[in-house]
Image (tube, rainbow, N blue to C red):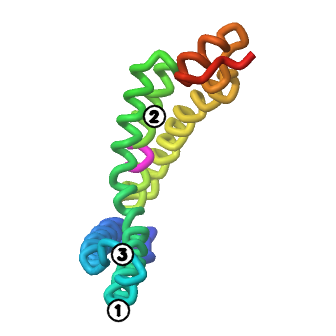
Amino acid sequence: MEYGVVLKRRGPSLTALLRWSGLVLVAGGLLMAVATALHPSRETPATILQSEVRLVAAHVLFTLSYLLVLLGLPGLYGTQSVVGFVMFGMAMAKRASFPRSSGILVVVGAPSQVLGFGLAQLVSPALWTLAILGSVALGAGLAWPGYQLWQTRHPDPLSPAPADADRHHSTRFPGRAASP
């Protein structure tokens, strides 16, 4: 007789959560349009008194629509965050502002992390290592330029250097005399 590990799924699958998230966003978007159509174009004392029921209904629908949008955004964010991290990492790798390697770590780490999470849940817990390695790469790719930003002293763009004070005041604020 063979013994194996039986994994019990707790709660809905990722696919089901993403589908529900999409449905909630559709409902929120439709309610937002209905609320806008119901709401008077101007809120003056006269329109408030004349269309109080419409106004209250519109505000209730706005509240409900924004609540639904807030509930649906995590699904939208979850599907778009990997693409955003990859594009952000590519931009970091192309710029000379930060080490090219940090951008490459972000480009490789974000998809590896998400792929590892998904595969560990759906295929085998042994693939959790991929999620860990992706997290380490993504974390290092973000921490490295973060450390550089933290260590570098940046001049305040609103405070001109003492020697340039007259020039900055006269060009930045036309018509204003330079301060002595």
The answer to which of 98 and 177 lies nearer the viewer is: 177
Q: What's the distance in space between the residues labelled 2 and 1, CA to CA?
A: 52 Å
Amino acid tagged 1? Val
- Give the main secondary structure, helix, strand or loop, of the magenta stretch: helix
Say which quarter of the image contains residue 71: bottom left
- Residue at the (54%, 23%) spot, across then down: 175
Mark 3 and mark 2 residues within 8 Å of each other at the beta carbon: no
Q: Earlier in the sequence, mark 3 or mark 1?
A: 1
Q: Secondary structure at mark 1?
A: helix
Say which quarter of the image contains residue 65: bottom left
Q: Is residue 180 magenta?
A: no
- Which marked residue is nearer to the observer: mark 3 or mark 1? 1
Amino acid tagged 2? Val
170 lies above or below 113: above
The span shown in magenta is 111-115
Residue at far bottom of view: 53
Q: Secondary structure at mark 3?
A: helix
Q: Position of residue 24 (x, y in %)?
A: 32, 74
- Residue under label 3, please give it: 65
